[in-house]
Image: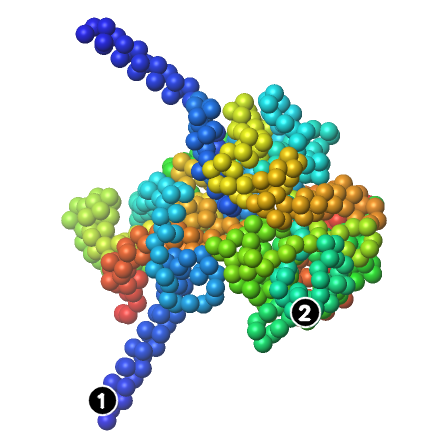
């Protein structure tokens, strides 16, 4: 009897999980469906059956070059992630294994910078970028995205590192490991799942960031967010084309997320049950 | 062999020298049919100016406005040519942010620009932006539904007629709304329509001393009429509808009338996208017999920021894109119906264009009936038909637009919306130093 209830409950929860997943995924699915419609079909109201035309994809590629913004997105997302990890690992290590009475305040202060509205610092940042010649450059955007995501990266790594027993590091020190040796050869391999999931999350955040990537670029460094924005129109219905552009922009990160979901979930739940 | 090597070397050196000399200008623009067409036709510009390369930055209107404003205010120098609207030109020209365009070449026919459009782009007698396409607003209506309602649309209707026709054309059972009007909040959305409409009701944003006028009966009459009309004959969820949403409704045959930008005529009359293409008639924007119609005036124009290092190349591009010859180029490649409208008088005298665009005369009459320098029945201290050309208007217009959109959605009464609009406007204008 108990087993029957358990099975029914399991089916119920599975069904609920699928329903929630479908609700979350539906906007993406509808974007893909709309991209396969003609423009009159796209404005005609809710309809899940498109005419499966590819003309929007052809038109999007004819109007704008996809490859350049795609490469910019890859370089900026991966570059900012690697740079962020290089800076965040030592920072998280020091806070996790050599905490002071100010550590929690510092962590909170770092996180509080994420609460600031980006528009409030647009003009000072724009002036800095102008003065340092970083406007419309991949380096400038890589630095910017690294900085805005750094608090989250440090927080996540700090959480993972705290799960690693300090005694292991002490043992390494007793065996004569230097500071960098301790971080590189002992700590990092043990925290690989956490570092990997942090990197994946950071790549997703950097790939999707639209406020700064649209405002600090023009043509040379413009990533896929700017590519999508260029298809939005105040006068004229280009919803099917806009959906095709969006699909092209989100496809790489969706595919990456699909293949790495096991790693991502493992990392995100690391230390959750103890 | 030596001679051949020498010739090849010279050729290579020439190519390299030429490549080094080539100048690239960056153009910021909005994404609409006319601008996309221009990007496709740039081979013609390149053929005439092989030493100039073009970089395009295409953005949504509001993002573009924010980006070019940030760039020009901080002298970021990211753009050499900017697409800006009639609202920005007088403000930016006054700030010294734009180069005057009084030397666009000997062949450039500046006198051919429609005077009302040129007036909105001129400051201190100098043209600061060259219009790429211009628009006013007018009534687009379904001839079949009008006939069914037993009415005939006059060329110059009154608001009373529009109200009567809208209510008679409404057929909720068949999903037909008598009238579709903008309701989405924003200074360039519902407030563009409502400000132009209020002009015909005798209202104004400010008196000569910059005192807000939302507590006056003219604004009450405007907003009362609008909300009642939309409740009786407008589509459901109208407070979320802007240009694109109403365009979709009209093209699907769900609107009896639509009062909006004249450029919409080319969309609703295009059989490829519109199900009612052969049933659309046009009329001037309505009035109340007070001497002003409820139509606006707008032009997307090309301007050159004062900080550009490539002014000569930028001027060559602006001259190419906004001259009469460009209209001929578009006509030869894409047909007269696709020529950017509303900028040149000669276009409206062209028999081929009149044939291809049945709305041409009504568009020109609408443009000519709007006067940005004298937009209202009573005198005002500002320029602009559907906006007030002061920097504070973007924020203030959007705030008031949100209040009026809430009144349309039934979240507040007309009286409450007007009282709050008055209070907000007085506070903002005092803070900005207009009210002493």
In this picture, residue B168 sits left or right of residue A188: right
Please provide percent x and percent y for residue B302.
58, 35
Q: Which residue is mark 2?
A: B149
Query: What is the secondary structure assignment of the residue under circle 1?
Result: helix
Q: Chain of mark 1?
A: A
Please provide percent x and percent y for residue A117.
52, 52
Task: State the residue lying farthest toward the left.
Answer: A175
Q: Nearer the viewer, residue B371 or B173?
A: B173
Task: State the residue lying farthest toward the bottom.
Answer: A1
Asked where in the image residue B315 lies, by quadrant, the reply is top right
Q: Relative to residue B23, is residue A37 depicted above or below?
A: below
In this picture, residue A8 sits left or right of residue A126: left
Q: Relative to residue B77, is residue B341 depicted above or below?
A: below
Which quadrant of the rendered structure holds the N terminus of chain A? bottom left
- Residue B74 is tagged as none
Picture residue at 44% right of the left edge, 61% below the top: A41
Q: Nearer the viewer, residue B337 or A60?
A: B337
Please provide percent x and percent y for residue A69.
37, 42
Q: Chain of mark 2?
A: B
Picture residue at 37% right of the left edge, 16% below the top: B17
**Count of picture labels:** 2
Query: What is the secondary structure assignment of the residue under circle 2?
Result: loop
- Residue A3 is tagged as 1
Please provide percent x and percent y for residue A55.
37, 52
Picture residue at 46% right of the left edge, 30% below the top: B44
Can you see residue B422? no
Are the residues under badges 1 and 2 in a single subunit? no
Picture residue at 75% right of the left edge, 52% below the top: B293
Q: Decide: few, some or many residues near mark 1? Use Cα within 10 Å; few <14, some 14-19, many ≥20.
A: few
Can you see residue B284? yes
């Amino acid at each position: 009897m108990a087993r029957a209830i358990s099975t029914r409950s399991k089916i119920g929860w599975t069904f609920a999980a699928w329903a929630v997943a479908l609700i979350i995924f539906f906007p993406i699915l509808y974007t893909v469906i709309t991209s396969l419609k003609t423009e009159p079909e796209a404005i005609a109201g809710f309809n899940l059956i498109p005419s499966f035309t590819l003309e929007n994809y052809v038109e999007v590629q004819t109007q704008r070059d996809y490859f350049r913004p795609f490469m910019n997105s890859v370089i900026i997302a991966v570059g900012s992630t690697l740079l962020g990890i290089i800076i965040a690992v030592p920072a998280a290590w020091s806070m996790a294994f050599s905490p002071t009475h100010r550590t929690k305040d510092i962590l909170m202060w770092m996180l509080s910078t994420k609460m600031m509205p980006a528009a409030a610092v647009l003009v000072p940042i724009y002036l800095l970028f102008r003065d340092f010649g970083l406007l419309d450059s991949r380096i400038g955007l890589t630095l910017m995205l690294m900085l805005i995501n750094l608090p989250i990266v440090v927080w996540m790594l700090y959480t993972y590192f705290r799960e690693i027993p300090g005694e292991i590091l002490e043992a390494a020190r007793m065996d004569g490991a230097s500071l960098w040796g301790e971080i590189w050869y002992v700590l990092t391999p043990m925290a690989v799942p956490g570092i990997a999931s942090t990197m994946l999350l950071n790549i997703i955040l950097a790939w999707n960031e639209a406020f700064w990537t649209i405002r600090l670029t023009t043509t040379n460094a413009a990533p896929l967010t700017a590519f999508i924005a260029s298809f939005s129109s105040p006068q004229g219905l280009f919803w099917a084309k806009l959906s095709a552009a969006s699909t092209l922009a989100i496809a790489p990160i969706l595919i990456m997320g699909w293949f790495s979901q096991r790693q991502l979930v493992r990392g995100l739940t690391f230390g959750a049950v103890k | 062999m030596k001679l051949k090597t020498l010739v090849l070397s010279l050729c290579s050196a020439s190519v390299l020298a030429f490549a080094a000399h080539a100048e690239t200008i960056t153009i910021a623009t909005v994404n609409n049919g006319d601008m996309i067409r221009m990007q496709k036709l740039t081979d013609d510009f390149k053929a005439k100016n092989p030493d100039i390369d073009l970089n395009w930055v295409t953005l949504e209107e509001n993002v573009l406005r924010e980006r070019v404003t940030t760039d020009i205010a901080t002298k970021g120098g990211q753009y050499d040519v900017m697409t800006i609207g009639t609202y920005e030109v007088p403000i930016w020209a006054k700030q010294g942010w734009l180069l005057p365009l009084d030397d666009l070449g000997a062949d450039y026919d500046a006198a051919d620009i429609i005077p009302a459009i040129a007036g909105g782009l001129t400051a201190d007698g100098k043209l600061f932006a060259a219009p790429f396409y211009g628009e006013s607003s007018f009534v687009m209506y379904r001839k079949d539904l009008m006939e069914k309602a037993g009415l005939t649309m006059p060329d110059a209707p009154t608001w009373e007629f529009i109200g009567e026709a809208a209510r008679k054309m409404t057929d909720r059972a068949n999903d037909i709304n008598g009238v579709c009007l903008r309701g989405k909040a924003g200074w360039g959305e519902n407030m563009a329509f409502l400000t132009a409409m209020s002009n015909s009701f005798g209202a104004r944003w400010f008196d000569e001393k910059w005192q807000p006028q939302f507590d006056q009966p003219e604004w009450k009459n405007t907003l009362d009429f609008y909300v009642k009309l939309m409740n009786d004959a407008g589509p459901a969820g109208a407070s979320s509808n802007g240009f694109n949403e109403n365009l979709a409704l009209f093209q699907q045959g769900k609107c009896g009338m639509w009062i909006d930008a004249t450029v919409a005529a080319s969309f609703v009359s295009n059989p490829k996208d519109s199900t009612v293409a052969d049933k659309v008639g046009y009329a001037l924007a309505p009035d109340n017999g007070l001497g002003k119609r409820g139509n606006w005036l707008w032009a997307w124009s090309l301007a050159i920021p004062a900080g550009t290092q490539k002014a000569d190349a930028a001027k060559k591009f602006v001259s190419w894109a906004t001259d009469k010859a460009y209209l001929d180029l578009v006509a030869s490649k894409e047909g007269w119906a696709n020529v950017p409208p509303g900028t040149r008088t000669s276009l409206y005298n062209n028999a081929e264009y009149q044939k291809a665009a049945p709305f041409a005369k009504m568009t020109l009459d609408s443009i000519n009936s709007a006067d940005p320098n004298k937009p209202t029945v009573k005198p005002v201290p500002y320029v602009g038909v559907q906006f007030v050309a002061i920097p504070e208007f973007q924020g203030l217009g959007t705030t008031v637009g949100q209040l009026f959109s809430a009144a349309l959605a039934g979240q507040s009464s007309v009286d409450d919306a007007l009282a709050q609009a008055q209070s907000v406007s007085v506070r903002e204008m005092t803070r900005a130093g207009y009210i002493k």
